[in-house]
Image (cartoon, rainbow, N blue to C red):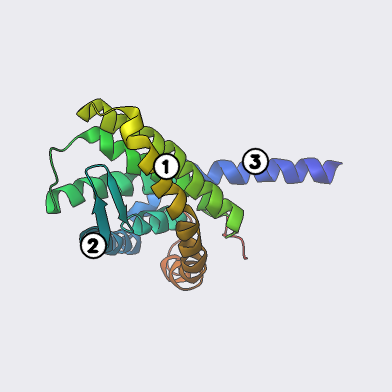
Amino acid sequence: MNEFLESSTNSKLLCKERLSPKTMNQLTDTRVMVFCGVMGAIAVVLSSVATIKIGDFLRIGFSSIPNQIVAFLFGPWIGMIFGGAMDIVKFMVHPDGQFNFLFTLVPMVSGLIYGFFLYKRPIKIWNIFLAELLVKIICNLGMNTFFIMLTTGNAFKAIMLPRILTNAGKLPCDVAIMLILLPIINKIIRPELESSRKPHGNVVCKPKKN
């Protein structure tokens, strides 16, 4: 009984440290900053060459993959900062209409969700599936649709159905991409980033092996 209580307590402490804002101290590491810069450049390129625009309200692309990788490696808070910063940078590089900070909140919340489910957690299909599902429900179908209605005055029925179909179609594809990419990132990139870095703040937990 005591062992069970101790294990439960350690698990709670681990989760608290894993999700602590102190994980942002990783940004003081030059390697982390350089890697985030590289991911940012890739995100800009993907937004240019790997995005398909259908009508005024539908976009199918893969420019969010760097956001997911950053959240996976560095946690929800850095994922949130990176997502918001990249939304602004993408708009500056490829302006499309009038900038509205409301839409910047969408990738920021996405970064939080990805970091919560993926950072220092086992790379399991259910963790990835839940992260992708919640991002599509909360961010894509919820926040994004509401902000489009708020700023354009379009009716809910006119834009919701095609958005549901698009996100439902992308869900298995996005899960599959993450199942392929994250083990590679975890095996090759993470050790390189952590090789010369001491734990920051209270984050001393190591990623679990598959």
In the rendered image, which residue does mark 2 sit on?
A: 41
Name the amino acid type tagged 2: Ala
**Residue visible at 29% across and 27% down in the picture:** 155
Q: Under tag 1, what secondary structure?
A: helix
Q: Earlier in the sequence, mark 1 or mark 2?
A: 2
In the rendered image, which residue does mark 3 sit on?
A: 12
Left or right: 201 in relation to 61: right
How many other residues sit within 10 Å of disc 1, few (<14), some (14-19) or many (≥20)?
Answer: some
Tag on residue 187?
Answer: none
Residue 77 horizontal/vertical position (percent): 40, 44
In the rendered image, which residue does mark 1 sit on?
A: 164
Say if residue 204 shows up in the picture: no
How many other residues sit within 10 Å of disc 2, few (<14), some (14-19) or many (≥20)?
Answer: some
Up the image or down, 122 lies above or below 58; here it is below
Cα distance in 3D space between marks 1 and 2 = 29 Å
Name the amino acid type tagged 3: Lys
Single out the residue that lies furthest toward the right.
Answer: 1
Q: Nearer the viewer, residue 190 or 29?
A: 190
Residue 2 horizontal/vertical position (percent): 84, 42
Say if residue 18 shows up in the picture: yes
How many other residues sit within 10 Å of disc 3, few (<14), some (14-19) or many (≥20)?
Answer: few
Left or right: 139 in relation to 178: left
Instruction: Tally the numbered discs.
Output: 3
Cα distance in 3D space between marks 2 and 3 = 36 Å
| The N terminus, quarter of image | top right
Left or right: 207 in relation to 21: right
